[in-house]
Image (cartoon, helix red, strand yellow):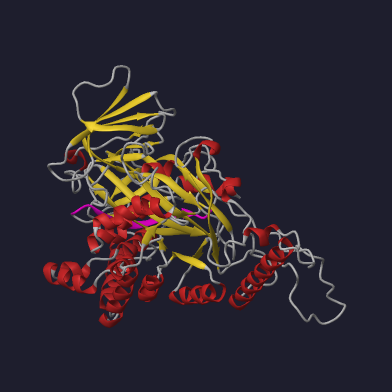
């Protein structure tokens, strides 16, 4: 199945000129000097040289014209050097297995009515599991993280009541043995358990956890009494009970995933009962309990999942007043895509050609007149409904802001998402009011302190690990570009586009509106794959992607959004089919009527990056019903 789907998704995206290519440096030089950088964004910030040996920063000194003979030198160009980001909660690299549920004698279900729970049902329970034992980032390593400025990540197991301990690793492209910083850190859990049988409901999950924690408490008492010389029965040899001893009593942080404010309440009650020390992960609606979280000093690892944006209806009304009837008549990208799809498949009547006889022409006119006389119904959602949707969306978006204002310590993690999207959403939060320094600190020094590695990470200073980034501007601003990332002394440089080249809007004469047909890459590429895009005057792009579903479910489609800057077009979207979701990003260049670029995807099997290409059929001014083909000889198109 994977062989069918992943290559098909590879052609998913609009081809554009490649993402900035990462350099091929794979080993650290003996001495590396990053020359002429600043350590803060102030205009009068001092320029310094960073000297690196053996993966450590050995000195940070004022910039000099001459450098150490024999050292490899990278010109910083006065760019901003900051600690590389830390992804504090991600599933990347760790495929969590289902626990072995039966760890006692099989239940004799026909003997009698059961009066008690099983002795050792371990469904959803595996505190002895370690992410470090299964870490696998594929052939390119954590490349997507490096490209977004992340030098370190905490890979955690997921999907179980007690899923096991995470591993803190670097994002370098090395063997696992060279990546691991801390092999075991924090226990992880959620109200979920894979597999069939009990428990499978929220009530069952609660009962399973409570029973297990009672077993842990009893196990600890038995062990203590035997060590004291008491003649008690020996305790069971149970690795899961042993691994969970630190949880009860709060001697180890238990990072628990929540999907609602009610989940936060449930975990707090469970923590109170057994003395657990918890942290909230995911935390979509955690702001509703901000005061309690701040009072109890419960940290929150936010995934920044606030769903599809609902546009502000007030701004929409202002736009309509500004543009008048033209705004009212404009179709949404989704409506245009639907109409254009119908036109391309022959479902709408095409215009009659000039050789039709008089009788046919008359008939066509009568039909057109009758069609015009029909009442035109257009449903408009009530303003109150649109305002409420926008309010709820803003609540979720501003979750981190409300938590920070209440004094809750907030960190950020990708979870099952991708790192570039996390950075982009953080930039949106900064625009919405989150202080830029708060966001940067949460990704760097604050995270390093929580993870117990503040001497190594989260700073650019003598004696710390050479894990830092060079940015063209404050990374929390939308125009900032990553120029270099150094992970344990191994540097990867990226192409930086000049502002004049990147532009703030589309280049003169460039318009991506129209249909883009994806070229067939190989025999496993999708069939019937194309985009229908529209673009406004500022270069904002929206549209829909269509393809023949590889699951044999007819046509698959999804919304895409993006931006045209100069001739660079970036798009993103999420395709769902067959119970799976694939997030994708495309970035590249327009050259005439074609694209060539790179498609980066996050699939259930990991990260995929592939080259793609497409050709353009622009909208050249015809009615939307006849839109889609510049070639007037196309068999489905007639031009008057």
Which image quadrant for residue 274?
bottom right
Query: Is residue 335 magenta-colored?
Result: no
* Residue 345 appears in the rendering: yes
Instruction: Tell me: 180 left or right of 408.
Output: right
Work out which residue is located at the far front of the displayed protein and give it: 229
Which image quadrant for residue 386?
bottom left
Q: For the C terminus, which image quadrant?
A: bottom left
Picture coordinates of residue 51, whole percent (x, y): 31, 29
Say which of 473 and 611 sits in front. Answer: 473
User: Residue sitting at 17 percent across and 67 percent down?
Assistant: 326
Say which of 328 and 75 sits in front. Answer: 75
Instruction: Tell me: 578 left or right of 631.
Output: right
The count of marks equals 0
> Relative to 261, does residue 305 appear above or below in the rendering?
above
Work out which residue is located at the far top of the displayed protein and give it: 69
Say which of 609 and 422 sits in front. Answer: 422
* Residue 635 appears in the rendering: no
Which residues make up the magenta segment?
538-551
Picture coordinates of residue 28, whole percent (x, y): 41, 28
> Relative to 19, does residue 336 appear above or below in the rendering?
below
Which image quadrant for residue 353?
bottom left
Say which of 348 and 122 sits in front. Answer: 122
Instruction: Tell me: 334 left or right of 76.
Output: right
Picture coordinates of residue 204, whole percent (x, y): 63, 76
Query: Is residue 543 magenta-colored?
Result: yes
Work out which residue is located at the far right of the displayed protein and give it: 111
> Relative to 134, does residue 242 appear above or below in the rendering?
below
- State whether the magenta stretch is mostly helix, strand or loop: strand
Picture coordinates of residue 392, whole percent (x, y): 33, 75
């Amino acid at each position: 199945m994977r062989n069918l789907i992943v290559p098909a998704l590879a052609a998913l995206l609009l081809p554009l000129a490649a993402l900035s290519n990462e350099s091929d440096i794979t080993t650290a030089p003996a001495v590396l000097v990053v020359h002429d950088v600043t350590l803060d964004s102030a205009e009068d910030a001092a320029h310094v040289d960073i000297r690196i040996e053996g993966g450590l920063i050995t000195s940070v000194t004022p910039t000099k014209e001459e450098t150490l003979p024999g050292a490899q030198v990278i010109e910083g160009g006065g760019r901003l050097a900051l600690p590389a980001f830390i992804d504090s909660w991600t599933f990347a690299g760790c495929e969590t297995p289902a626990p072995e549920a039966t760890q006692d004698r099989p239940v004799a279900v026909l003997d009698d009515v059961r009066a008690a729970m099983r002795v050792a049902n371990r469904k959803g329970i595996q505190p002895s599991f370690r992410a470090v034992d299964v870490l696998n980032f594929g052939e390119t390593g954590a490349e997507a993280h490096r490209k977004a400025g992340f030098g370190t990540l905490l890979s955690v197991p997921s999907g179980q009541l007690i899923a096991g301990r995470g591993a803190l690793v670097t994002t370098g492209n090395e063997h696992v043995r060279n990546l691991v910083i801390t092999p075991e850190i924090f226990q992880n859990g959620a109200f979920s358990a894979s597999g069939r049988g009990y428990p499978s409901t929220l009530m069952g999950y609660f009962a399973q956890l409570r029973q297990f924690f009672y077993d842990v408490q009893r196990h600890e008492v038995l062990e203590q009494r035997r060590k004291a010389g008491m003649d008690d029965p020996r305790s069971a040899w149970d690795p899961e009970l042993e691994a969970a001893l630190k949880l009860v009593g709060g001697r180890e942080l238990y990072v628990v995933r929540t999907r609602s404010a009610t989940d936060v309440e449930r975990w707090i009650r469970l923590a109170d009962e057994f003395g657990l020390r918890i942290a909230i992960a995911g935390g979509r609606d955690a702001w509703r309990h901000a005061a309690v979280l701040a009072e109890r000093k419960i940290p929150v690892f936010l995934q920044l999942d606030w769903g599809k944006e609902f546009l502000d209806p007030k701004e929409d009304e202002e736009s309509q007043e500004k543009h008048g009837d033209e705004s009212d008549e404009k179709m949404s990208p989704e409506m245009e895509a639907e109409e254009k799809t119908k036109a391309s498949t022959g479902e709408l009547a095409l215009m009659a050609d000039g050789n039709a006889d008089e009788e046919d022409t008359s008939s066509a006119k009568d039909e057109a007149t009758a069609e015009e006389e029909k009442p035109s119904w257009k449903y408009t959602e009530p303003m109150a409904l649109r305002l409420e949707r926008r309010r709820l969306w803003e609540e979720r978006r501003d979750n981190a802001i409300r938590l920070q204002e209440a004094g809750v310590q907030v960190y950020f993690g990708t979870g099952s998402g991708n790192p570039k999207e996390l950075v982009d959403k953080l930039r949106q939060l900064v625009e919405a009011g989150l202080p830029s320094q708060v966001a940067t600190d949460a990704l760097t020094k604050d995270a390093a302190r929580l993870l117990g590695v503040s001497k190594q990470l989260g700073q650019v200073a003598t004696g710390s690990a050479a894990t830092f980034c060079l940015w063209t501007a404050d990374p929390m601003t939308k125009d900032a570009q990553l120029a270099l990332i150094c992970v344990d002394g191994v540097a990867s440089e990226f192409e930086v586009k000049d502002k004049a080249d990147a532009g703030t809007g589309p280049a003169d004469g460039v318009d991506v509106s129209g249909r883009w047909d994806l070229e067939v890459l190989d025999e496993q590429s999708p069939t019937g794959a194309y985009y229908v895009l529209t673009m406004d005057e500022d270069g904002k792009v929206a549209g829909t992607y269509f393809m023949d579903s590889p699951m044999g479910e007819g046509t698959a489609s999804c919304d895409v959004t993006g931006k045209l800057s100069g001739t660079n077009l970036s798009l993103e979207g999420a395709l769902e089919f067959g119970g799976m979701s694939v997030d994708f990003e495309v970035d590249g260049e327009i050259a005439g009527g074609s694209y060539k670029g790179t498609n980066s995807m996050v699939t259930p099997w990991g990260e995929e990056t592939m080259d793609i290409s497409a050709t353009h059929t622009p909208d050249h001014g015809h009615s939307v019903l006849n839109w889609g083909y510049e070639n007037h000889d196309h068999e489905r198109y007639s031009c008057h």
